[in-house]
Amino acid sequence: MPVVQIFGSFRAFTDGRAEVTVKGTTFKQVLDALAHDWPALAPVIDEGVSLAIDGRMIKDSWFEPVREDSEVVLMPQMQGG
Amino acid sequence: MSLDNVPEHDEDAAAPAGEYRPRDFKVVGTRPLRPDGIDKVTGKAMYGADFYAPGMLVGKMLRSPHAHARIVRLDTSKATALPGVKAVMTAADFPAPRNIEAKDVGHHIMAHDQVLYDGHAVAAVAATSEAVAKQALKLIDVEYEVLPHVVDVDEAVKPGAVIVREGQRNKKVPDGYSDNCSGWYECGHGDVEAGFAKADLIVERSFKTASTHQGYIEPHACLASMGPDGRADLWCCTQGHYGVRRMCAGILGMEQSQLRVTASEIGGGFGGKTTVFIEPVALKLSEKAGRPVKIVMSREEVFRATGPTTSSSTDVKIGMTRDGKITAATAMCRYEGGAWDNWTVNMGVQSAFASYDLEAVKSQGVNVLTNRPKQAAYRAPGTPQATYAVESVMDELCQKLELDPIDTRLKNAAREGTKAAYGPTYAKIGLVELLEAAKAHPHYSAPLEPGVSRGVSNGFWFNFGGETCVSLALNFDGTITLIEGNPDIGGSRAAMTMMAAEELGVAYEKVRTLVADTASLGHNETTHGSRVTFAVGLATIKAARAAKAEMCRRAAKFWGIDPDAVEWVDGCARATGHNAGDFEPMPIEKIAKDSPSTGGPIVGHHEVTAEGAGVSFGVHLVDLKVDPETGFTEVVRYTVFQDAGKAIHPSYVEGQLQGGAAQGIGWALNEGYIYGADGCLQNPGFLDYRVPVASDLPRIDTVILEIPNPGHPYGVRGVGETGIVPPLAAITNAVSRNIGVRMNALPMSPPAIRAAIKSKG
């Protein structure tokens, strides 16, 4: 199962854990699993987040594959100018 | 200077994973004439204020003269009764908002029971002439109860500060901050305290930056026409007409299909035209009046009531060994973005140390509400402010440890495999190559004349992709019409035309690219985040490939062979393979001409949420001199180094880099919102808010490196935003070295520099 890295301000929703292991082989499955396993994260995810999967920032592609050994980082959603 | 002077990049080393495949380009990389050039220099181009409709009314908005006040009474009856006035509206005319975006954007456009910034609109009128509209505004009776205000970020963040809006505190915000703090973000890794313990020198400094405006030439303008059936058309200058449709529909309670938005040509945006300020008002006035309504902002309105960038206050601490290795780094960013929450601080926090490979790093930030207009994006939003602070401390460390600024950055530079401070591990990136190019450049080795000093800075930006559609039609004469859905703010029609021509093997002149309205093409995310050349380019290439595949199928049918035995080469279908048969290549013109009889019109299209935009880095060098008597700074030489992945049209890329540097020079030296003790903006015009003009600037040289982005078929990385990130620190570092005082606030106007020189005693 992939390990999701949780950075500082999101750790408040994962009992301070810097890494959590979740089920999932796609972007959407990982986010759904995060929201399920860590209910405090659910509203944050609903508000909009990104995942960096193996160095690629993924904003909103549900079927983007996630491997068992993928580097997955939970990030805020971003905007540009 | 340009591509010719840059060492060849090893394409094999770029690892053609993902979308990218090396190729020899024929059109991409050349410099054809821009397709919009003649229209723009002859005045034929239609900007936001150029649209007219029969029976059109003039819309005007009444704005608050106070930074913070309760609206005790708002009486529009006299204005409504004025002959020639056809509609009057207030916030009460907007329905209940559908979502947070509609609530915040609608509230920013027009005040409810309180005005929250100087310039906050309270009512609007539509009249038969501008004179009548102005007279009507004077007849609107508003009684205000003036409330305490706060406009300074450091004041607003303190416990006990004037509260801008109750109930906005974010629960992630730690104790010790005021209830104005609406957002908090932090990132990093490693043990920073242990890292600082290893340092030979630690520098810790605090910095402030003023709020700046994007300074686009064209004020916001729109024409709205809503019929009695609730169907509406809107023409406006914007960076994203699909976003305008979404926001207007959300604020007005419309279905999106009932609103068609057409983007005009755009006279600059730089992030400031990614939201709406007047469009819902024009639509509501049109609905009430039953006639089209045009609103054009004055320059004063643009300054007071659109979205400047955040002002900031940032603390940075960096520890370094004697030989220049960073041992630990921290940043605390305080950003104010007006009276509404925003995410800009998140970008600042994440980007602060993105250029470095660090074992121990911690970056934190808080968004603070103030009595100012709601901030909008401005090129790489949030990033110049944080980078300014980090790169200033880096320079001070280099100066104190007598280290070369570029060598020190090279020693610590992020590279492929670096765990970025904001989380991901980088794939192939180009920062090391940029630093090496800067070090090898004649600018860096040029002797400094007396009185001239040199500054260096890195910069970083994320780059985005997003939802994108294009449609590429083969006309019966063999020419191509390409339809995209993003306003052309930086040469996208030229870039898309070139990528389509490249892929199809036809001449640039055979392709015409147009920007569709919202009813003519599927959704396209706003032109922001340096996304268009990457994402729309990717979709264009895929649409062209779809059209090529269909053209090969038509040729195969004609020849009676398997489609797999046909390939597309230089604008022709060619039979290939041993058993394909001996056929003359079939040119695109013949396939197009025959298409009605071979299956019908040929159109390639592609729809995608583009991901995989490669991050971007830049390095800037600046030489300048400071007049100690007046404090005036003259920039005498400037060179930008940036990785474009692949420069589709190098002239446009150079323009982006030069434009970013010019705006950064203005931000560093002169630009800044100035508020009086009453919380009102004191300089809402270009006479008192001074952007650099041509005579203020030297030639800005550019060096484009091309380290392919694995996520794009041609290797493209966005280039629109990174260019504004390094100038703030590069210029600060040069000024600080010049006058012998470390500068820690922007803008470094002549009085500020004079004061710093005097402080030396």
Image: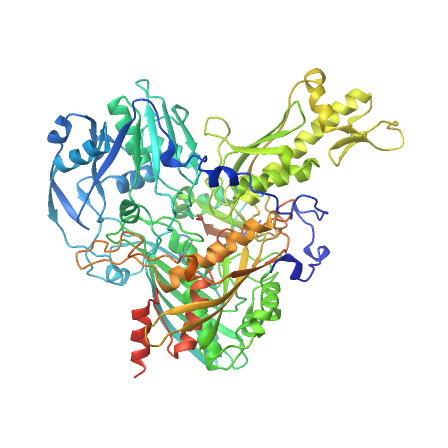
Does B346 sit left or right of B637 as displayed? left
Image quadrant holding the N terminus of chain B, namely bottom right
Closest to the observer, B113 or B727: B727
- Residue farthest toward the top in the current orientation of the protein: B597
Does B716 sit left or right of B551 as displayed? left
Q: Does A76 appear above or below B251?
A: below
**Residue B444: x %, y % from top left:** 56, 72
Is residue A17 visible in the rendered image? The answer is no
Image quadrant holding the C terminus of chain B, namely bottom left
Identify the image quadrant of residue B539.
Answer: top right
Closest to the observer, B158 or A27: B158
**Residue B226: x %, y % from top left:** 32, 23
For the point 82% across and 22% down, the residue is B559
**Residue B671: x %, y % from top left:** 34, 59
Does B515 sit left or right of A43 as displayed? right
**Residue B60: x %, y % from top left:** 24, 35
Is residue B371 visible in the rendered image? The answer is yes
Q: Does B193 appear above or below B387?
A: below
